[in-house]
Every structure is written in structure tokens, then in C-alpha cells.
């Protein structure tokens, strides 16, 4: 039934691509190149380590593992695969991987063909990736396979009466490195005991970004001056409806906005909503940013470094699909706002508990919190310190995994 479901999914992707769905079309185009890419680039008699991430967020969790492996074990080559175009396209030129491609659809024929070509020494699946035919075949071939930064909740299929086939997949892992004790307890209840609680490798990733301190002269020029700076990351329309009214009335603040979707329609919408002088990053020069009230980041790859210029951050998605990466902002020791859809995000819950994160459910609530910070500098500093301390105190997952594996 599982494999039949995969074929149904493939049919839906093809149908969506036929009707112009952009991501479906990108996925199918990428899948055409998978095996040619592998045949062309695989070096015979070489030990490969295979990392798989669903999308960009999971890739960021995997990066500390990949980069530590390359630094400490140059004898290994790295194959990096993605499920989603939103992960593959930004990371396809990632220099720390020898080969980057899509994961083929999880049919038995694709699985055997892929593993025959790569023949990995070790495999790391990041967070929520549980492709059962791949896991079965890796287990049958006795290839060491690990789950990294995974997190489990009671409502997942593994823990339901009908989840037997999915539970079996978990037994295919040689070890699962999970984020919290709750995940280990849930797995123990279904007799999965090869588990270690190590935390989330994303903490290591954001700390490395902090330490690298990427130079962004245009952003630095925009941030200079007497006004405080509010940085919005991964903004959706629902988020803008909450925070934008405040900044249309409070020009003592500057704004940087990075939209979740970067296209001309979205950027124009933001420009229409904001009642001040906007400038797009890709079209800006020094004079333009110094005279602007709002800098719109209309490209990818800068946001995690831009947060360091902010006094307060807002991470979008919390009024829809779920919040994006709050750690990228919190690592800089600034308070982080986000919407109410954050219950499944452990780091958001922890930030709320320590006072470094603030859940905002309405425009009025947002205004109240902003006014409180504006009136009390000590309150702002305290919230920012709590956020930064939370990140620094939870680092080290990558090292724990390497130690456990004897690498």
C-alpha cells in the first residue's frame, strides 16, 4: 500500500506540473537528471556519506554535520539530496557537498538504482525524513543509517494503532539522535530504544553564522542612525496585516522586511502597504539606503546575517503554515516576535518560557508589546539577553553526535 501511495503521489505531481504548478515542474525537471548526475560524478572505490534533507530548513540542520565531517574526515565524499525544490534550488551549488541532487521518488526500482550508484558508507536523514523503501533497502544492505535532529509527537502516525508499517521504518535506523526527552520516551513506548537525546543541530548552525559575521555594507549603512531597527524575516501577507499598521504610525523605527516569497508581486504589495520610503536591496546603493525608511530584501541567502543589525525581530508564518526559524534571530540576543501557530516548535515554546520570544495574536497585542519595549529599555535588553542565552546554552548537538558515532 505504501509503494502504491508513492505512485499515486507521482501521478499528482505530474498532473500538477501539466497544469503549470511551478514547484511540481521544477521537481520533475530535476528528477530527470538524478541518475545522470550520479553516473557522471560518482568516483569509483570512494567512501561516500549521504545526507538527505527535505527542504532548506532541514538542510540548515544538516550543515553543521556536513561541515564538521569535511573538516575532520576529508577521506569521505558527500552526496546531498533534497525532496523539495525550495531546498534543492538554493543549495544546488553548496561547495561542501561533492554531489547535490534530488532524492528520487521512493519506489523500489529507484531505491535500488540510487543505492547501487552511491553505495554510501553512512546515511543521515535530517529531522522528518522517513522514506520506507529507502530505509528497508539500506537496512537489508547493512548500511549504517541515522536520523538526526528528529523530534516526535504523540499525534504522529508512528504512535497510532494503524501506524504499524511506519513503526517498522523506525527500526531500520541504526540510531536516532533526537531533540528532546519526550521524543525518546515516545519511541521507547513502541520499543525503539537505539536513541540518544542530543538536542538540535540548528543551534550549532546559527552560532556559526553569528561567528562568521558576514559583511553587508548596504544593510549596515541602512541600520546606522538614531532610529531603532525592526527586522522581519519570512514575512507573509497575514504577518504584514499585524505589524505594518504600527510602523505606518511610528516612523521612529526603521524596517527591514524579507518576504517568504521573493517575486515582484509580493514586493510590490509590501511597498503598497508601507507608508514610507522603501528601497529594494538588489536595486539599492549607499545613498538610497541612507535615505530610506524600509529596506526590502528581495533575494535569498542574507536573512540569517541581517538579523544582527536589528533591535527586535519578527519571524513570519505564525498566522498560517507555522513559524519559520526563530533561532536565526534569537542568536543575536534580540527579542523575537512570532504568530500563534507555534505549538509544534519546541524552540518557540522555550523562548516564550524564558522571555526571549513573544507570541503575537493580533495587531493590538503587537502594539502593546512594542510600546512596552519602547518605554522601557531595560525590558528590551532583558528579553534580548534571554533569547541569546537560550541559544548559547543549547549548542553542541553536532559534537555529541560525532562522539557517539566515534567520528
Image (cartoon, rainbow, N blue to C red):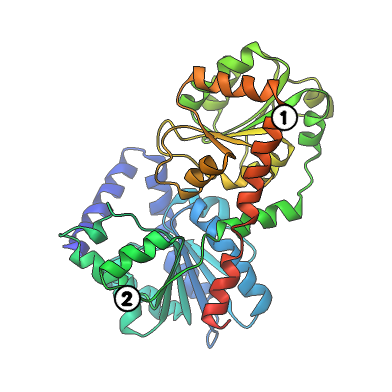
- The residue labelled by disc 1 is 283
Q: Residue at x 45, y 77 (%)?
A: 118
Q: Nearer the viewer, residue 28 or 138?
A: 138
262 lies left or right of 136: right
In the image: residue 4, left or right of residue 254: left
Residue 225, given in percent of the width and then of the height, sits at 83, 25
Tell me if mark 2 has few (under 14), some (14-19) or many (20+) residues whose alpha carbon lies within 10 angstroms of its own.
Answer: many
Q: Residue, x 76% and y 50% (percent of image)?
A: 213
User: Which residue is situated farthest in the bottom direction here?
Assistant: 45
Q: Secondary structure at mark 2?
A: loop
Residue 161 is situated, as x and y percent measured from the top left of the image, at 15, 60
> Real-space Cα distance between discs 1 and 2?
50 Å
Callout 1 environment at 10 Å: few (<14), some (14 to 19), or many (20+)? few
* Residue 315 seen from this side: no
User: Which of the 4 image quarters holds residue 103?
Assistant: bottom left
Q: Is residue 221 visible in the rendered structure shown here? A: yes
Badges 1 and 2: C-beta atoms under 8 Å apart? no
| Total numbered badges shown on the rendered structure | 2
- Helix, strand or loop at label 1? It is helix
Q: Is residue 38 above or below residue 386?
A: below
Earlier sequence position, callout 1 versus callout 2: 2
Q: Which residue is mark 2?
A: 172
Amino acid at each position: 500500500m505504501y509503494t502504491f501511495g508513492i505512485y499515486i503521489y507521482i501521478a499528482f505531481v505530474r498532473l500538477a506540473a501539466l497544469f503549470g504548478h511551478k514547484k511540481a515542474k521544477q521537481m520533475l525537471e530535476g528528477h530527470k537528471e538524478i541518475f545522470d548526475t550520479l553516473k557522471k560524478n560518482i568516483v569509483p572505490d570512494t567512501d561516500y556519506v549521504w545526507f538527505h534533507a527535505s527542504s532548506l530548513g532541514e538542510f540548515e540542520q544538516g550543515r553543521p554535520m556536513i561541515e564538521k565531517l569535511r573538516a575532520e574526515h576529508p577521506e569521505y565524499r558527500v552526496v546531498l539530496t533534497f525532496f523539495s525544490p525550495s531546498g534543492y534550488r538554493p543549495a544546488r551549488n553548496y561547495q561542501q557537498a561533492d554531489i547535490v541532487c534530488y532524492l528520487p521518488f521512493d519506489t523500489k526500482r529507484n531505491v535500488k538504482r540510487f543505492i547501487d550508484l552511491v553505495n554510501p558508507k553512512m546515511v543521515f536523514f535530517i529531522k522528518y525524513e522517513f522514506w520506507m523503501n529507502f530505509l528497508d533497502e539500506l537496512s537489508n544492505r547493512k548500511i549504517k543509517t541515522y536520523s538526526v535532529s528528529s523530534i516526535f509527537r504523540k499525534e504522529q502516525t508512528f504512535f497510532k494503532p494503524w501506524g504499524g508499517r511506519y513503526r517498522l521504518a523506525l527500526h531500520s535506523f541504526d540510531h536516532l539522535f533526537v531533540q528532546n526527552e519526550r521524543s525518546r520516551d515516545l519511541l521507547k513506548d513502541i520499543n525503539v530504544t537505539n536513541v540518544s537525546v542530543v538536542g538540535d543541530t540548528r543551534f550549532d548552525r546559527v552560532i556559526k553564522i553569528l561567528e562568521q559575521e558576514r559583511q553587508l555594507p548596504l544593510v549596515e549603512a541602512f541600520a546606522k542612525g538614531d532610529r531603532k531597527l525592526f527586522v522581519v524575516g519570512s514575512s507573509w501577507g497575514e504577518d504584514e496585516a499585524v505589524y505594518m499598521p504600527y510602523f505606518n504610525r511610528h516612523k521612529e523605527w526603521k524596517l527591514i522586511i524579507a518576504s517568504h516569497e521573493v517575486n515582484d508581486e509580493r514586493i510590490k504589495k509590501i511597498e503598497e502597504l508601507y507608508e514610507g520610503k522603501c528601497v529594494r536591496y538588489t536595486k539599492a546603493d549607499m545613498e538610497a539606503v541612507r535615505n530610506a525608511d524600509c529596506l526590502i530584501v528581495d533575494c535569498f541567502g542574507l536573512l540569517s546575517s541581517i538579523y544582527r543589525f536589528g533591535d527586535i525581530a519578527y519571524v513570519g508564518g505564525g498566522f498560517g503554515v507555522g513559524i519559520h526559524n526563530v533561532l536565526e534571530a534569537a542568536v543575536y540576543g534580540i527579542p523575537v516576535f512570532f504568530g500563534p501557530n507555534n505549538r509544534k516548535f519546541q524552540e518557540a515554546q522555550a523562548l516564550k518560557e524564558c522571555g526571549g520570544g513573544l507570541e503575537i495574536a493580533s495587531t493590538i497585542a503587537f502594539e502593546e508589546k512594542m510600546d512596552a519595549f519602547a518605554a522601557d529599555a531595560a525590558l528590551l535588553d532583558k528579553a534580548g539577553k534571554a533569547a541569546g542565552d537560550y541559544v548559547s546554552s543549547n549548542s553542541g548537538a553536532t559534537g555529541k553526535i560525532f562522539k557517539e558515532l566515534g567520528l
